[in-house]
Amino acid sequence: MTKVELTGVEVAKHKSADDCWVIVHGRAYDVTDFLPEHPGGSKIILKYAGKDATEEFDPIHPPDTLEKYLPKDKHKGPVDMSTVVVEKQEVLPEEQERMKRIEEMPLLEQCYNLLDFEGVAKRVMKKTAWGYYSSAADDEITLRENQTAFQRIWFRPKILVNVEKVDFSTTMLGTKVDIPFYVTATALGKLGHVEGEVVLTRASARHNVVQMIPTLASCSFDEIMDAADASQVQWLQLYVNKDRAITKRIVEHAEKRGCKGLFITVDAPQLGRREKDMRLKFTDEGSNVQKGSGEKTDNSQGAARAISSFIDPGLCWDDIPWFRSVTKMPIVLKGVQRVEDVLRAVEVGCAGVVLSNHGGRQLDFARSGIEVLAETMPVLKKMGLEKKIEVYVDGGVRRATDIIKALCLGAKGVGIGRPFLYAMSAYGQEGVERAMQLLKDEMEMNMRLIGARTIEELNEGMVDARGLFSHGVGPVNFLAERVYDPLVGPPQRERSKL
């Protein structure tokens, strides 16, 4: 029997903390019992009580969230949207100015490098979205170090090599790719683009690169997998849930759907303080989720904290054998930051590690992945272990020269995250595809200029990394300086009018 459509008037009656319904994608849901548990706090839901909350819901929730986590008796049925009162939203002067900047955006063809996309995105993204994507931990020292570390490595090019034909294809975890980078996992894709992570999926397919699917995507896992080409390879990035039954279900489903790698994030037992994000988001009263007895929720921690309270701080080395027992996917530890832990990853049978500091978003003053790589590979080679594990790097990669430097120092490939988010936010799928093509063009040119015809010919003798460990000031990167958004203090309050 078909359920009779509800009217907007009926839904609008349920608008209190004791009786709260919301409309999402034309269907009504009773979220009263969920109010105390909502990671973003109850106030943000109550703002839309009895109303259509779709616009607020979409950027930070996968579309199947309510179907998965809200009991079926709370699904109140379809709503006749023609009867729902559409509230006229006041367009603030700030938003009007942003829309003007969108109209004045440079042509896509005028973006010649990845930092160009960042500069455009900074001007046209909503402040809250920019704050989430661009923010990093504390003083953002590590965020900037990730890029400047590459600038302390210099090339030692070979000459008179026949480089008419250059091939920079390679394999990563057994997958043949056209260029040695992958789209690393980044959360909340719909903050930047209405279609979210599927934009990155389609662009990755066009360029034959691997996409790592994030746990905290705006799109559902299955939505991202369904958007992939039949032959496309995807990996799963995993934040480990305190409830291991949930974790097991996620891993088994990913393997069943065809994921070819499990990347366990190991550098986030607690989310770092990201002050740009904190100043712009979630200033409501907070929620009871994950509270201990008598514990008060810090409700000013930004979008990252609001969506990640489930992550298990108790994850440890003892868990790795369990992961190996529940999946045949190769296991890679994402967020390794010292050579001793790389050696232990070899011991416990991991297929790979990602040398990463979470894009500078966790521990400030963590060293760059490229520096840890330069420390790690000589040790692995001395011990004869360099073939036992695949080593990847992410953080700060903005040029193909950065990719080449990492490969010369022994990396199997690099992960790139923010630049593709910025390209997507500004120009959609075409922007991401152009960003990837720019990297391919740079790769071909710089492989020729360094004197290497294949990835296998890149080696540590082609770089001078002696200055890498000094942490001194390298050359000024004017592009990076132009797009960097400096941290600011709290705004001055206006004096009350008498």
Image (cartoon, helix red, strand yellow):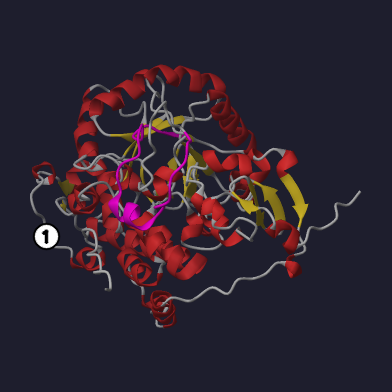
Which residue position is annotated with label 1?
475
Residue 463 position, x and y percent, is 17, 48
Most foreground residue, 35 or 496: 496
- Classify residue 40 as left or right of residue 273: right
Range covered by the magenta-colored residues? 263-289
Three-letter residue code for mark 1: Pro
- Classify residue 220 as left or right of residue 127: right
Residue 232 position, x and y percent, is 57, 48
- Classify residue 434 as left or right of residue 372: right
Q: Is residue 440 visible?
A: no
Image-quadrant location for residue 22: bottom right
Residue positioned 37% across, 29% down in the render: 389
Is 303 situated above or below 480? Answer: above
Q: Quadrant of the C terminus?
A: bottom left
| Marker count (numbered) | 1
Residue positioned 31% across, 21% down in the render: 344
Q: Residue furthest front?
A: 498
Q: 10 Å neighbourhood of mark 1: few (<14), some, or many (≥20)?
A: few
